[in-house]
Image (cartoon, rainbow, N blue to C red):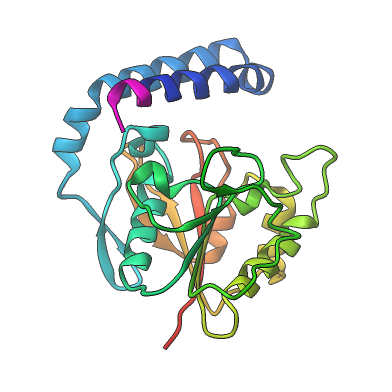
Amino acid sequence: MSNIHVLRTEVSRTVSALRGSINDKGVVRTAERVAAVAAAQVLAPLIRTRRQNNRFEFRGERLPYTLARYNNSFLNERAVEVSIAHWFLSKNTGRVLEVGNVLRHYGVTGQTVLDKYEVIPGVLNYDVVDFVPESPFDTVVAISTLEHVGWDETPRQPDNVFRAMDNVKKFGGTDGRVLVTVPIGHNKVLDAGLRAGKVSFPQETWLARTNRRNDWAEVEPEEALSRTYGEPYTGANAIYVGMVLSD
């Protein structure tokens, strides 16, 4: 993906987010955020060089951070989410379904993509709540996508996130592998469901951001669920990772 395309994408993303940010945080805080993102984009090559050997712990493994310019991954939760997805997919053979068109932007190709809103060639535009595949997939991945289901839609239908979670598990059939990541604090109904055990996977991991540099570490569920989205750092300050791992 060319630097020009990345820059255009980031400008478009930033402009579309400005109105909501101004309403939520005010003009001054919004201006500070835009300035910080612009500066980080300029410094991206230096950041990648300095951090290329940094690792974070995930289920007994040490994974590299994803330090891509796209979506400013070196500044937010994508730094660990995309790396976890790479780790997960490296152990896979078979048909792969991705819910939400995320990983293609980070060099992962060959998967079937299901995304209700992104109308581009090669993407199935169906609602994850209603989609029924012709046959189960061997591997299913959803990276920071399901928290938007029913929450960032009009009309808002908050309980749809739980239907989406259940459906994603079904996409893998009885023997499929499933990976789901969601940010803590974006969807209050989902957070409550995580606290109450309404959302659960056989393997669960919680990670929290530890500093401004964007380092992450595994934490207990209570610690992750206490974090606030967007504070003290932009984006998620904690994430939930749920997995179904085949033998």
Q: Quadrant of the C terminus?
A: bottom left
Q: Residue 119 sits in which quadrant?
A: top right
Estimate the x, y position of residue 35 in percent, counting from the top left.
Answer: 40, 14
Seen in the image, is 129 located left or right of residue 91? right
- Residue positioned 45% across, 84% down in the render: 246
Judging depth in this view, the residue of 165 and 79 nearest the camera is: 165
Q: In this rendering, is residue 3 above or below 231?
A: above
Judge by depth and name the residue closer to the eye, 82 or 198.
Answer: 82
| Residue 174 percent coordinates (x, y) | 58, 85
Q: Is residue 231 left or right of residue 91?
A: right
The kind of secondary structure the magenta stretch mainly shows is helix
Q: Is residue 213 above or below residue 179?
A: above
Q: Which residues are magenta?
A: 1-6
Residue lying farthest to the bottom in this orientation: 247
When asked about the image quadrant of residue 162, the answer is bottom right
Instruction: Residue at 49% x, 35% y: name it.
Output: 232
Q: Position of residue 97 (x, y in %)?
A: 51, 62
Say which residue appears at 75% left-offset and 53% top-offset: 189
Let me know if residue 80 is in the magenta part. no
The quadrant of the image that shows the N terminus is top left
Which residue is nearer to you in this view: 113 or 81? 113
Badge count = 0
Q: In the visual, does 123 lie left or right of 163?
A: left
Magenta stretch contains residue 2: yes
Percent x, y of residue 55: 23, 55
